[in-house]
Amino acid sequence: MKLVHTIADLREALAPHRSPAFVPTMGNLHAGHLDLVRQAQPLGDVTVSSIFVNRLQFGPNEDFDTYPRTLQTDCARLEEAGCDIVFAPPEKELYPEPQVYKVQPPSDLADILEGHFRPGFFIGVCTVVMKLFQCVFSDAKGPRYALFGKKDYQQLMIIRRMVQQFAMPVQVIAGETQRAPDGLALSSRNGYLSETERAEAVQLNLTLRALARDALAAAGSLPARREALEAQAMRSLAVRGWKPDYLTVRRRSDLQVPRAEDALSPQSLVVLGAARLGNTRLIDNLEI
Ligand code: PAF
């Protein structure tokens, strides 16, 4: 496996290849990332991963400074998972000057849910993903693949639409959320949890499951009952000491609130949630 730090070295390492399969990450890798790398391997003729903690997608009070930087361990894991090239640029390489050109995703998709609680988050994500795609894919001659986990459901959807709207020659592929045996979605931020918090953390998933059951049971009356069901789910986490941002039932297709016909058609809904446990903000979702 090659580790490169500059765009020039990345392009040189990619030169003999036609068809990169790319897994962008911010490092501090867990089994979910490695699963994406394994899924990437049979797709292209070279598997590339990036490790870059992207300042643009962090708010002023978020964890950019404390986000774990674990390059050595990450590289060992990526090599074991079969990655061929790791691109780990220093900040000055990707942002040699302030990044004043940015990708502005549409408000109906990017200013709701995560975007509502993390203003500017998806501008930062889209901008860096667009730039990373330029670094990895610009000289490719064959099909290009990019893999993203479903745990960041809204991110996946926004990137899919960005690729489509800009006619980028990239196939976006989704990886299933990987979970700990108790059901907690794997996340780089789980490492922030204390032992007690870790035991409690699965409640986000359990509460989403309960909300999913209630939403399915409501069927055609979901539009009338949705807000009450969501409020009940938020309360059940709040009484356990969580600070929920949102727990909500949405249409899978565009993350808008479901109408009766959506609620009645199979596999058309997703429940999504974000909540703070102590100082750690966790997110999760379930397609239902
Ligand atoms: O999901 C992530 O880890 C990040 O948002 C991504 C896609 C690597 C962009 O920085």
Image (tube, helix red, strand yellow):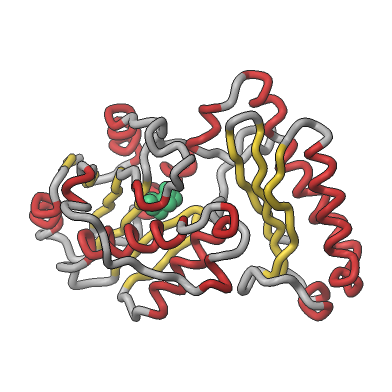
Q: Residue at x 76, y 73 (%)?
A: 258
Is 195 situated above or below 3?
A: above
Is 93 situated above or below 279?
A: below
Mark yes or no: residue 39 visible.
Answer: no
Left or right: where 192 falls relative to 23: right
Q: Give x and y (percent) for residue 205.
A: 71, 43
Q: How many marks?
A: 0
Image quadrant occupied by the C terminus: bottom right
Q: Nearer the viewer, residue 62 or 22?
A: 62
Q: Give x and y (percent) for residue 110.
A: 53, 66
Q: Residue at x 16, y 43 (%)?
A: 5
Q: Nearer the viewer, residue 41 or 276?
A: 276
Q: Residue at x 83, y 35 (%)?
A: 239
Is 201 situated above or below 227?
A: above
Is 19 situated above or below 89?
A: below
Q: Give x and y (percent) for residue 106.
A: 49, 74
Query: Where, by quadrant of the figure, is residue 281 drawn?
Result: top right
Mark yes or no: residue 177 visible.
Answer: yes
Image quadrant occupied by the N terminus: top left
Q: Residue at x 10, y 60 (%)?
A: 15
Q: Give x and y (percent) for residue 124.
A: 39, 57
Query: Where, by quadrant of the figure, is residue 134 drawn?
Result: bottom left
Name the residue at the top extreme: 195
